[in-house]
Image (spheres, grey):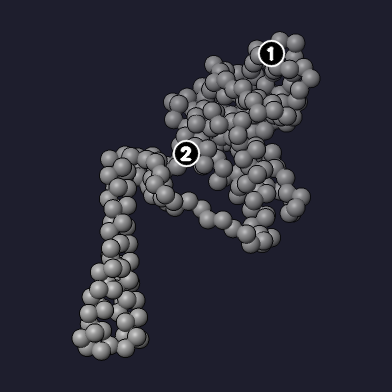
C-alpha cells in the first residue's frame, strides 16, 4: 500500500513537472529511508518499554531480555550484557590466569559451606567464596605456566586476625583424628577450635566447630573417615567472643 501511494504521488509529479527518471529514484529512496527510520524508532521504543515493564531493576526484578541480564547481589541491582563470542587466540597472560582460576576453583569448591563461616568477615560487597577466591589467586599459586600448582602451605580456607599456635600436628587414631598444638602464649586460652577435613580426591569436606580450647593443647575429633582415602586437614581458632577467626593452618595430607 505504501509503495502504491508513493508511485502515485511521484508519478503525478513526474507528469506535471516533467521530472527525470533520476528524480523519481531519489524520491523513492528518500521515502523508503524515512519509513524505515520511523519503523525502527517505534519498535525500539516498544522493546524498551516491554523490558522496563518486565524488569524494573529498582524493585528487585531479575531475568533476561535479549542480550541484557538484570540481577540482584548483596542488596544492589545490576545490569549486564551477555559475553560475546571470542575467536582470537588467547595470549600467554590470559592462559596463565585461566590456569590459576581452574586451580583455585577446584581447590575451594568443596569448602564452600565452611567458607561462609570462616571468610564471612572478608565478604564485604561480595560473597565469602569470592573473597576466598581472590585471596588464593594472589597468594596460593606456585610454579610457572604451564606447570602452575596450588601451594597448600600458603592456601587459606579461613582468614582472620586471631593468632595461630607456633606448631601443630595431626594423626589418625583408632578413635578418630587427633590434633595437637603448642600454645605460644598468644591469643586467649578460651579461644575455641575449628577442625576441617577435605577429601583430597573427591568433592567432599567435613568440618566441626568443637568445644576444644586453645589451652587444652590437643583435641580428639571422633569422626569416621575412609581408611583408604587421603584427607587435607586444617586447624583454625576462633576467638572466645566469636567475633573473628585465625588464618587456617594446613596440617598436611594424611
Badge 2: few (under 14), some or many (20 or more) residues near its Cα, within 10 Å?
some
Q: Nearer the viewer, residue 173 or 133?
A: 133
For disc 1, the marked residue is 224
Quadrant of the image occupied by residue 53: top left
At which x and y percent is residue 229? 76, 22
Q: Secondary structure under badge 1?
A: loop
**Number of numbered tags placed on the structure image:** 2
Residue at (31, 56) in percent of width and height = 43
Which marked residue is nearer to the observer: mark 2 or mark 1?
A: 2
At which x and y percent is residue 72? 38, 41
Q: Who comes first in sequence, dot 2 or dot 1?
A: 2
For disc 2, the marked residue is 127
Quarter of the image where the N terminus is located? bottom left
Residue at (38, 49) in percent of width and height = 79
Q: Nearer the viewer, residue 233 or 87?
A: 87
* Above/below status of 182 relative to 11: above
Farthest residue in the top direction?
A: 175
At which x and y percent is residue 252? 73, 31
Whether label 2 touches label 1, CB < 8 Å: no
Amino acid at each position: 500500500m505504501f509503495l502504491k501511494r508513493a508511485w502515485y504521488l511521484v508519478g503525478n509529479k513526474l507528469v506535471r513537472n516533467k521530472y527525470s527518471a533520476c528524480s523519481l529514484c531519489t524520491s523513492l529512496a528518500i521515502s523508503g529511508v524515512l519509513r524505515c527510520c520511523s519503523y525502527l524508532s517505534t519498535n525500539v521504543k516498544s522493546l524498551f518499554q516491554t523490558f522496563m515493564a518486565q524488569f524494573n531493576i529498582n524493585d528487585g526484578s531479575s531475568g533476561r531480555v535479549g542480550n541484557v541480564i538484570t540481577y540482584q547481589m548483596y542488596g544492589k541491582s545490576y545490569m549486564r550484557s551477555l559475553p560475546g563470542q571470542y575467536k582470537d587466540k588467547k595470549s600467554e597472560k590470559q592462559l596463565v590466569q585461566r590456569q590459576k582460576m581452574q586451580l583455585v576453583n577446584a581447590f575451594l569448591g568443596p569448602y564452600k559451606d565452611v567458607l561462609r563461616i570462616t571468610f564471612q568477615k572478608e565478604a564485604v560487597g561480595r560473597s565469602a567464596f569470592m573473597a576466598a577466591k581472590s585471596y588464593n589467586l594472589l597468594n596460593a599459586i606456585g610454579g610457572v605456566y604451564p606447570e602452575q600448582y596450588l601451594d597448600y602451605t600458603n592456601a587459606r580456607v579461613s582468614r582472620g586476625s586471631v593468632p595461630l599456635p607456633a606448631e601443630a600436628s595431626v594423626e589418625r587414631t583408632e578413635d578418630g583424628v587427633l590434633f595437637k598444638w603448642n600454645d605460644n602464649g598468644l591469643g586467649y586460652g578460651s579461644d575455641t577450635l575449628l577442625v576441617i577435613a577435605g577429601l583430597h580426591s573427591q568433592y567432599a569436606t567435613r568440618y566441626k566447630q568443637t568445644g576444644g580450647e586453645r589451652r587444652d593443647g590437643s583435641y580428639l575429633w571422633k569422626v569416621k573417615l575412609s581408611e583408604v582415602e587421603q584427607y587435607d586437614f586444617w586447624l583454625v581458632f576462633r576467638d572466645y567472643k566469636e567475633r573473628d577467626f585465625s588464618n587456617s593452618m594446613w596440617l598436611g595430607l594424611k
